[in-house]
Image (cartoon, grey):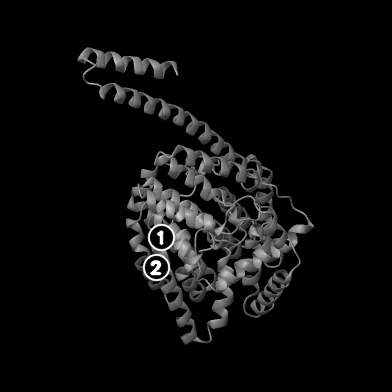
Amino acid sequence: MGIGLIVLGLFVLYWRTQKYYHLIDDIVRRWGYLYIVPEVSPPPQFYSSKPSKWRHLFLIITHALNVWLVYMLWGWVPAILFAFSPISVPATAWLTGGYYAVTALLSLTAYFFIQLYPNFVGVIIASLFFTASLGSTITCLGLPFTFLIFNPWGLFLFWPTLMYLKGRRFSRGYQIRDMGKQDKFGIHKLPVMVKTVAYYIYKQIFPYRLAFFQHFGEDYVRDKECRDYMESLNKWFWISLASIIVFVVIGWQFSPIGVVWFLFLIGPFSQFKVLGQFVAERYMYLPSIGWYLILGNALAPYPILLWVVIGLYVLRSHFYIPAYEKIESLYEDGIRNHPECLANYANLGERYIHIGRLLDGRDVLQKGIDLDKDNFLCYTNMAAFWIQVKDIKKGLYYTDKSIDLGKTKSSWYIVNAMRNQRREVQAFEKKYNREVLFADQFKKKEEKPNELTGSSVVKAAEEALSAVAMG
């Protein structure tokens, strides 16, 4: 099949995204990547606005270029699987996901030049592209390791990798993200890494329950029971280890480079050190190409089965793309596919409150609290709801509750933010009580018309105001 038809189908599938709303994870310019961790979200109305159509068109073009590079390197079968896979949706339909698509574009270009020119010229050109790739996101960090087995010329990419890891951007980014994380690498992390890699393999092979936030590992840093379970050599560990072994043994029969590509590129996100979201589909965009090499070679002799898989990919992508239309649909889709994930309830409830759907927001947050009585995120946003409806006592209750839970289940800056909120609520309560006092005093004066003239009403109001000012 020609690459033109694949790209045409890709554009048809994703064309609707040009009408989608702003949907950005961290509003940070690329030159601020890793240097800045935003602690304040954009104003609510930002997510009700639409970006230029060119921004989503850029994402489609970037994904199309990545598909073309896969086509040039390995042929049309892995290219078409990559083009229409639902794992590719976040990098193509989501504005922030475009960073990961750009990383893949630069990484694939570097790989392409090393394969095309296995000499010093190819290495120099590839190093330039790979250095730029590292500056986009770190999802390409495992690429040099693939050359330990294939094409030793690629080992030169370890040079820009080491320079990057020793550089100010990565060091600063690591320091910021390590704050508040009680997580250290050691032998105890090996079961966590095995289970996480096995989970990614499962998601890659069976991409039907997809969502921005997923429950797997969600409470690892916050909850001791979850942490002990993840670090245990339990039944889940042995099943995970067996799954990885089966993946390697069977996958190697069809594409050794596919096995190495997937495992080495997903390896940095095996959570040997928790620094961000525990699992995320956007981390899979570049590693997933390894799976398409395996699957493509396995299905190539069976065209009917191949087209059935492609059809299922297109169908799942078709229904998954609308999740990225706006921020509400993202979290609503997350609750449908991962109803056990608390982050979806906390974020959807917050969004509903922002857009004036107060009761809907309260109901969603209550569902999250019912799922987990220690869920500080839902308590945090429930506090915001009660403050919005002027129930100060309940607002303070949920604020204090979120602070208490956040001391062991959150990062330091969220706890500090809630403490600031408590001070603001207390100040608002004081002001509110003064206003109520003034209104009551003024009302009592008005209820005695025979005793008050027009000037005495003014005088009574002045006295009430004076009492409030002195109080």
Mark 2, residue position: 10
Amino acid carrying mark 1 in the image: Ile
Question: How many residues crowd mark 1 within 10 Å: few (<14), some (14–19), many (20+)?
Answer: many
Q: Is residue 159 left or right of residue 396?
A: right
Q: Is residue 38 visible?
A: no
Q: Quadrant of residue 139?
A: bottom right
User: In screen coordinates, is 310 left or right of 154?
Assistant: left
Q: Residue at x 69, y 53 (%)?
A: 273
Q: Is residue 66 among what the camera can see? A: yes
x then y, percent, for residue 163:
67, 46
User: Which percent across, then down, holds residue 272?
Assistant: 70, 56
Label 2, secondary structure: give it: helix
Residue 60 image label: 1
Other-residue count near label 2 (Cα within 10 Å), few / some / many at <14 / 14–19 / ≥20: many
Total number of numbered discs in the rendering = 2
Three-letter code, disc 2: Leu
Closest to the observer: 24 or 416?
A: 416
Disc number for residue 129: none
- 10 or 321, which is in the foreground? 321
User: Is the residue 229 above or below the residue 310 in the image?
Assistant: above
Viewer-proximal residue, 65 or 427?
A: 427
Q: Where is residue 256 drawn, in percent x and y? A: 66, 74
Quadrant position of the C terminus in the picture: top left
Instruction: Write the residue at 63% across / 62% down.
Output: 266
Report the residue at 47% width, 28% height from top.
427
Q: Residue furthest front?
A: 450
Q: Residue at x 63, y 50 (%)?
A: 275
For the N terminus, give its image quadrant.
bottom left
320 or 71, which lies in front?
A: 320
Q: Are marks 1 and 2 in contact (CB under 8 Å)?
A: yes
Q: Relative to residue 148, is residue 456 depicted above or below? A: above
Q: Is residue 251 left or right of residue 430?
A: right
